[in-house]
Image (tube, rainbow, N blue to C red):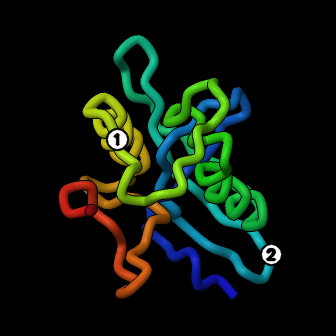
Amino acid sequence: PLDWIEVDQEVDYYRCNGERVRARLADLDPKAGTCHVLYTVHRAGVPHRRSAVLYLAELWRMQQQRLLPQQYSELTSRARPLVIEAVERRGITVDQLASLRSFMEKQCSVEDVIDGWKCSRSGEALRVSTIN
């Protein structure tokens, strides 16, 4: 089922050179298992519209790629993790909080909505401005 995607939705698209761009899903062909995306790249300050046709399975993989554990590496230090059993003794520095906010903002496809992050209680999309 294609309940994870719909036409006009913004998606991550990884170009042949590995560059990640935000693209708009222009068309879906479930029978062929393909889709058509539109995106813009900027070269020397000039926008260039591009399009691509890809398999839905590949698009699914691209969407999941954002959420792989290695994608969180910018939030962790290279040091071995310190385990603090008592939850009330775990803290976060202001710099760590700023890094977390910056990371969340990078995950947004539309202003303030964090792609792929949902409230565990309501199922609603999380927003940078209201996350707690």
* Residue for badge 2: 32
Query: Which class describes the residues within 10 Å of circle 2: few (<14), some (14-19), or many (20+)?
Result: few
Residue 87 at x, y percent in the picture: 43, 59
Viewport quadrant of the N terminus: bottom right
Between 118 and 44, the one nearer to me in the picture: 118
Kindly check if marks 2 and 1 are in contact, taking CB atoms under 8 A apart as contact.
no
Number of the front mark, 2 or 1: 1
Q: Which mark is residue 92?
A: 1
Position of the C terminus, as image quadrant, is bottom left
Question: Residue at point 45% right, 17% down?
Answer: 43
Q: Secondary structure at mark 2?
A: loop
Determine the CA span between mark 2 and mark 1. Answer: 49 Å
Q: Is the residue 98 above or below the residue 65 in the image?
A: above
The local secondary structure at tag 1 comes to loop
Residue drawn 53% across the image and 32% down it: 74
For image coordinates 66% across by 58% down, the residue present is 64
Q: Amino acid at mark 2?
A: Ala
Nearer to the camera, 130 or 110: 130
